[in-house]
Amino acid sequence: MEYSHGDSTRGLKLVCKLAVLLFLCAAAASGQLTDDYYDGCCPQVYRIVRSRVFAAMKAEVRMGASLLRLHFHDCFVNGCDGSILLDGSNSEKFAAPNNNSVRGFEVIDAIKADLESACPGIVSCADILALAAKYGVLLSGGPGYDVLLGRRDGLVANQTGANSNLPSPFDSISVIIQKFKDVGLNNITDVVVLSGGHTIGRSRCVLFSDRLANFSATNSVDPTLDSSLASSLQQLCRGGDGNQLAALDVNSTDVFDNHYFQNLLNKKGLLSSDQGLVSSSDPGVAATKPLVQAYSTDSRRFFCDFGKSMVKMGNISPLTGSAGQVRKNCRAVN
């Protein structure tokens, strides 16, 4: 193949530009996540991610909650390394907590494609997940917080870990607290405030239908579930395949606010693991219930603590420096 002098010059300039960008990012990589990691090598990352998330939520407002959940489900397995995005036989996408449930992959693909055009080989898929979650929260009316960046992408998925490590709506509060501790989130505040992310989004009937019938030998319906809400949920889920969707926050489904906590105090938590924060006999409730009560009356405190806990969660075992890689395609290793 022959090139004109102009083509050669343009190609050389492009190679030099990419080398400079890679140098700037390499200079920022010190083994620690920072809030200015891409400032020198891809400053447009924030605009690009926000624009794509905004468009996705304009088409389907629920996507904000989906992107938040995607980041959460990534970080609890292998750390925040983008492993949930990988396809293949061991894909975390097919683990029980994720299969037919976790979504938003096409949005991440679109963001990655835009970033590869703007600054190829620079922005990791793990960082894209963290930023997409941030804008999903912000554009739902939630708090802004500084996302620390500089993660690199993992090379393997962990379907077994996804099946065992992720908090389940069927887990007791003590088990959920332990799963948080297992990934380094040792403060009970993290458990309660990150559960508050359920102020946006929806859940499938299969994840709460056990509360609606044959609950126990003495109660057909879970007695910690408001009777009027139980009736409406029974109507929704009756005769379906378990994939019908109900709002996690019956007061303000798509708005990030503190109504979730008010719901729990009124027995209107959708999932057993949510309502259990105040209503179960589990010993962990002694620590979780006071926080639910506090957040139910103080949205400012909830917003502040949520941002802090999201930063902590985003710092679970990140790959930095020369570990991992920056994937060109979020669904496959390079």
Image: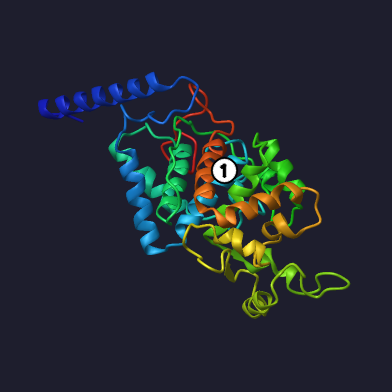
- Rendered location of residue 86, percent (x, y): 53, 43
- Rendered location of residue 308, percent (x, y): 53, 39
Q: Considering the numbered disc 1 on the image, is that residue within a helix, a strand or a loop?
A: helix
Q: Is residue 140 above or below residue 158?
A: below
Number of numbered labels in the structure image = 1
Answer whether residue 87 is visible to the viewer in this image.
no
Query: Quick one: label 1, few (<14), some, or many (20+) residues within 10 Å?
Result: many
- Rendered location of residue 59, percent (x, y): 37, 63
User: Split into 4 quadrants, where in the image is the N terminus?
Assistant: top left
Colouring scheme, one of rainbow, by chain, secondary structure, one colour: rainbow
Drawn side of residue 334 relative to residue 241, left or right: left
Residue at 59% over, 31% down: 317
Q: Which residue is mark 1?
A: 74
Drawn side of residue 234 relative to residue 154, left or right: right
Answer whether residue 201 is visible to the viewer in this image.
yes
In which quadrant of the rendered view does residue 13 lie? Answer: top left
The amino acid sitting under disc 1 is Asp
